[in-house]
Image: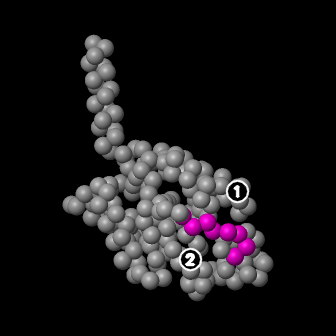
Amino acid sequence: MVNENIIANEQHWEKKNIEEGYTLWFTGLSGSGKSAVAERVAIRLEEEYGESVERLDGDIVRQHLTADLGFTKEDRDKNIERVSFVAKLLSRNGVAVLASFISPYIQRREKTRDMVTNFIEVFVKCPVKVCEERDVKGLYEKARNGEIKNFTGISDPYQEPEDPEIVLETHKETIEESVQKVIDYLLTNEYIKEP
């Protein structure tokens, strides 16, 4: 009887491991295109590949999960820590998580990598000048005028990833090209299979 239980338990974990999800962690400056690319990747993963997808986006999470936090380094780290925990729960249960956060600090992103199942860092690389041109909310202008403190890329640093799995150069690529890069990576590394 004990042996049957051990075998059943091993089969359960083998099945569970096959069904593990992954986390695509989109990091980059405000206005770099993180959310736009992630949204289109999510649609393709659901519609073309039948994936269970959850989007975790900075603006939405700030409203519902981390409204109590500001933008100091400590608060930013706490924000990402909470999101990482959610991503961990989802990805270990077979969900494809698409997280779009500036997440400016290397050390905090590395902690997330260690915590989350199948972490894939997607660096959405775009010069500050281009991000400012795209900024419909006027955040960069407010930051430059001193109206917003601790603004990443202006008064607070952004530490570029040292060795990301995927680099998207959204100032040189169309959204479709960036999306395809992500899909190609997932196919090549067998996170998804051709339908």
> In this view, which residue lies farthest toward the top?
1
Percent position (x, y) of residue 92? 42, 44
Which residue lies at the image location 53% right of the left edge and 78% below the top edge?
126
Rendered location of residue 75, percent (x, y): 70, 56
Q: Which residue is mark 2?
A: 31
Magenta residues span: 154-161
Image quadrant in which the C terminus is located: bottom left
* Amino acid carrying mark 1 in the image: Asp
In whole angstroms, how far apart are the C-alphas of marks 2 and 1?
21 Å
Amino acid type, residue under disc 2 in the picture = Gly
Displayed quadrant of residue 76: bottom right
The answer to whether any part of residue 50 appears in the image is: no
Query: What kind of element bears circle 1?
Result: helix
Q: Nearer the viewer, residue 45 or 187?
A: 187
Q: Earlier in the sequence, mark 2 or mark 1?
A: 2
- Does the magenta segment cover residue 25? no
**Marks 2 and 1: CB-CB under 8 Å?**
no
Q: Is residue 48 left or right of residue 166?
A: left
Residue that mark 1 sits on: 75
Instruction: Please tell me whether residue 158 belongs to the stretch shown in magenta.
Output: yes
Residue plotted at (42% across, 50% down): 118
Camera-nearest residue between 152 and 41: 152
Which quadrant is the N terminus positioned in?
top left
Q: Residue at x 44, y 73 (%)?
A: 168
Circle 1 crowding by C-alpha within 10 Å: few under 14, some 14–19, many from 20? some
Task: Identify the residue shown where x is 43% and y is 62%.
Answer: 165
Q: Main secondary structure of the magenta part?
A: loop
Give the colour scheme shown. one colour
